[in-house]
């Protein structure tokens, strides 16, 4: 039977899940896969990895939001264009 994970580790994975828009299990799985690839075995290292992934997801989210906003702006003659139903 698997041990109960650390509360701080669960909180870090929950914040990551919220930022990525996925379930807690999916975020935890992502951290576990990255940790296994990096050879991290302790909970503190996995928590730090989850925080790094959260920072990465947050920064890329801001960049993606800015890019999407610029793509959705109407330009020139399209400004007053409207489709019929």
Image: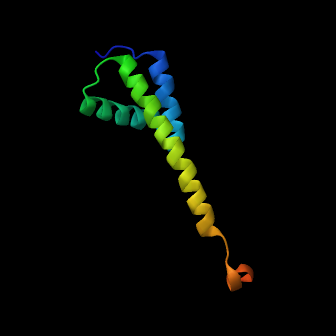
| Colouring | rainbow
Above or below, 1 relative to 68: above
Closer to the camera in the image, 75 or 31: 75
Would you say 55 lies left or right of 75 here?
Answer: left
**Rendered image quadrant of residue 39:** top left
Quadrant in which residue 6 is drawn:
top left
- Answer whether residue 83 is visible to the viewer in this image: no
Residue 34, image x, y percentages? 31, 34
Whether residue 52 is visible here, answered yes or no, is yes
Q: Quadrant of the C terminus?
A: bottom right
Residue 71: give x, y in percent of width and height. 59, 68
Q: Residue at x 29, y 24 (%)?
A: 40
Query: Could you say which is closer to the camera, residue 4 or residue 30?
Result: 30
Q: Residue at x 72, y 79 (%)?
A: 79
Residue at 32% across, 17% down: 42
Does residue 43 appear left or right of residue 64 in this picture? left
Residue 38 drawn above or below residue 75: above
At a point 28% along the width and 15% down the height, the residue shown is 1
Quadrant hosting residue 52 = top left
Nearer the observer, 2 or 35: 35
Q: Is residue 42 above or below residue 32?
A: above
Residue 57 at x, y percent in the picture: 48, 42
On screen, 45 above or below 58? above
Whole-percent x and y of residue 15?
A: 53, 32
């Amino acid at each position: 039977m698997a041990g109960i994970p650390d509360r701080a580790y669960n909180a870090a994975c929950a914040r990551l899940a919220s930022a990525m828009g996925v379930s807690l299990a999916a975020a935890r799985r992502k951290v576990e896969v990255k940790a296994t690839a990096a050879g991290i075995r302790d909970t503190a290292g996995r928590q730090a990895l989850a925080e790094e992934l959260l920072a990465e997801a947050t920064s890329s989210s801001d960049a993606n939001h800015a890019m999407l906003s610029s793509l959705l702006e109407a330009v020139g003659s399209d400004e007053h264009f409207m489709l019929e139903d």
